[in-house]
Image (tube, rainbow, N blue to C red):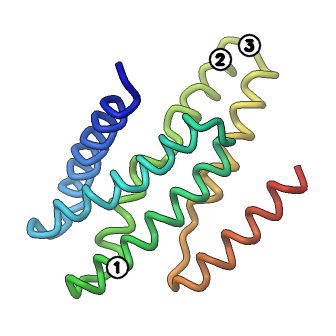
Amino acid sequence: MGFIIESMIEFFVAIFATVSFAVLFSAPKKELLLCGLTGAIGWIVYFIMINSNFDAVFASAIAAFVLSVFARLFAAIKKQPVTVYLLTGIFPLVPGAGIFYTAYYLFMGDNSTAGAKGVLTFKIADLEKLKPKPEDDIDYLVDVLKKIRKE
C-alpha cells in the first residue's frame, strides 16, 4: 500500500477515534467534526515524522505543538473553550500502547525491555502537558528540544 493511501487511512481513523472520544467526553455535538480534525492533524504530523525516521519523543513534541495551535485556532473561530478541541484532540497521541507494553514486559520478566519502554512512554506522556497560552507551548517546546539535543 502506498504511503499516501496509508496516510489517508491513518487520518480518517484518527478522526473517527477522536470523535468517539469527544462523544464520551461530552463535547458539544456541533463541534465533533473539528474535534476529530484536531486529533487527526496531530496524529498525521506524528505519523509522517515517525515514517521519516524522527525519534518518537521529538515527533510527539512537534505533533502536540501543531495540535495545540489548531485547537486554539478552532476555539477562536468557533468561540468555544480551547479545552473542547485540546483535550479531545490529544487522544490519538496518548501513549497507551507504550503503557501496555511496559506492563506486559514487566509481567513477562523482561525488566530491561520494560524499563526502556517505560522511559520512552514517560518521555512522550511528559510532552503532552500542553499549556494554557500559546506562548507557553512555544517555551515548553524549546525546552523539550534542548533536552532531546542533550541526550
**Spatial distance from mark 2 to mark 1, Cα to Cα?**
43 Å
Nearest the camera: 64 or 20? Answer: 64
Residue 24, placed above or below residue 95? below
**Spatial distance from mark 3 to mark 1, Cα to Cα?**
46 Å
Residue 4, placed above or below residue 73? above
Given contact means CB atoms under 8 Å apart, are the residues at marks 3 and 1 in contact?
A: no
Residue at image point 35% right, 34% down: 4
Q: Quadrant of the N terminus?
A: top left
Q: Earlier in the sequence, mark 3 or mark 1?
A: 1
Q: Residue furthest top?
A: 108
> SS class of the residue under badge 2?
helix
> SS class of the residue under badge 1?
helix
Please rate how many residues cluster around mark 2, counting C-alpha atoms within 10 Å: few if below 14, some from 14 to 19, many from 20. Answer: few
Q: Which mark is residue 109?
A: 3
Q: Is residue 70 left or right of residue 78?
A: right
Given contact means CB atoms under 8 Å apart, are the residues at marks 2 and 1 in contact?
A: no
**Residue designated by label 1:** 73
Camera-side mark, 2 or 1: 1
**Spatial distance from mark 3 to mark 2, Cα to Cα?**
5 Å
Q: Earlier in the sequence, mark 2 or mark 1?
A: 1
Given contact means CB atoms under 8 Å apart, are the residues at marks 3 and 2 in contact?
A: yes
Q: Is residue 48 left or right of residue 53?
A: left
Residue 5, placed above or below residue 95? above
> SS class of the residue under badge 3?
loop
Toward which corner of the image does residue 41 lie, by quadrant?
Answer: bottom left
Identify residue type, mark 3.
Gly
Q: Residue furthest right?
A: 150
**Residue designated by label 2:** 107
Q: Is residue 42 left or right of residue 119?
A: left
Residue at image point 42% right, 57% down: 90
